[in-house]
Image (cartoon, rainbow, N blue to C red):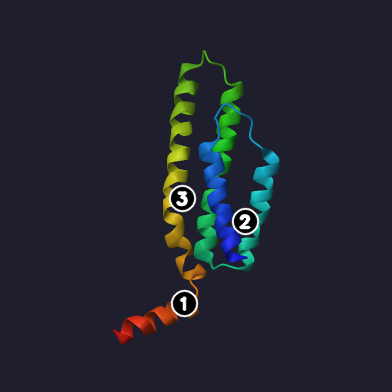
Amino acid sequence: MRYSIYSSVKELIEYATAANPSAPVDTSRVRNLYVKLDEARFFFDEGVIAFINDVCATAEAYFNLRSERAVANPDDTQNWIWLADQLASCPKRLRDLYAAAPAAFESSLRFDQVTTKKSRDIAKR
């Protein structure tokens, strides 16, 4: 279950950053990922949950900005500049979170039997 949640974090980030910003958001897919990620509170400590919440909040902000841009007045230069800045920063933040995900989940996803065996094998050398 823990690895499934980790995979869902990565899937949400991949979906948000790979999707065409002009295309509509697949709300059903995103909702299913959010439901899966909500289960993390049963399996992970506060640090991992905070990381997941950061991913969800950033993805949600990005989806909302995309929707806002779709209805924004193109003649409102200040708003367009602000939207462009925000729309550029969200995917960058999501890519940074993607890169940080293995470290955030490392202690929760390690397999003690493998880690212990590996440590014994190294000690024998």
Q: Neighbour class for label 1 at 10 Å: few (<14), some, many (≥20)?
A: few
Farthest-out residue, top: 75
Res 117 → quadrant = bottom left
Three-letter code for the amino acid on which mark 3 is drawn? Tyr
Q: Which residue is found at the position 57% from the left and 30% from the top?
A: 66
* Above or below for 81 versus 97: above
Q: Is residue 4 visible?
A: yes
Residue 69 percent coordinates (x, y): 56, 25
Q: Tag on residue 98? A: 3
Residue 110 percent coordinates (x, y): 48, 71
Residue 112 percent coordinates (x, y): 48, 78
Q: Secondary structure at mark 1?
A: helix
Q: Which residue is found at the position 64% from the left and 30% from the top?
A: 24
The Cα atoms of the two marked residues, 1 and 2, are separated by 26 Å
The Cα atoms of the two marked residues, 3 and 2, are separated by 15 Å
* Above or below for 110 versus 72: below
Q: Earlier in the sequence, mark 1 or mark 2?
A: 2
Look at the numbered discs 3 and 1 and tell me whether their residues touch, using CB distance below 8 Å. no
Which one is in front in this view, the residue at disc 1 or the one at disc 2? 1
Relative horizontal placement of residue 25, taking residue 110 as reference (left or right)? right
Three-letter code for the amino acid on which mark 1 is drawn? Val
Q: Earlier in the sequence, mark 3 or mark 1?
A: 3
Q: Tag on residue 37? A: 2
Q: Earlier in the sequence, mark 3 or mark 2?
A: 2
Farthest-out residue, left: 125
Viewer-proximal residue among 31 and 19? 19
Q: Which residue is mark 1?
A: 114
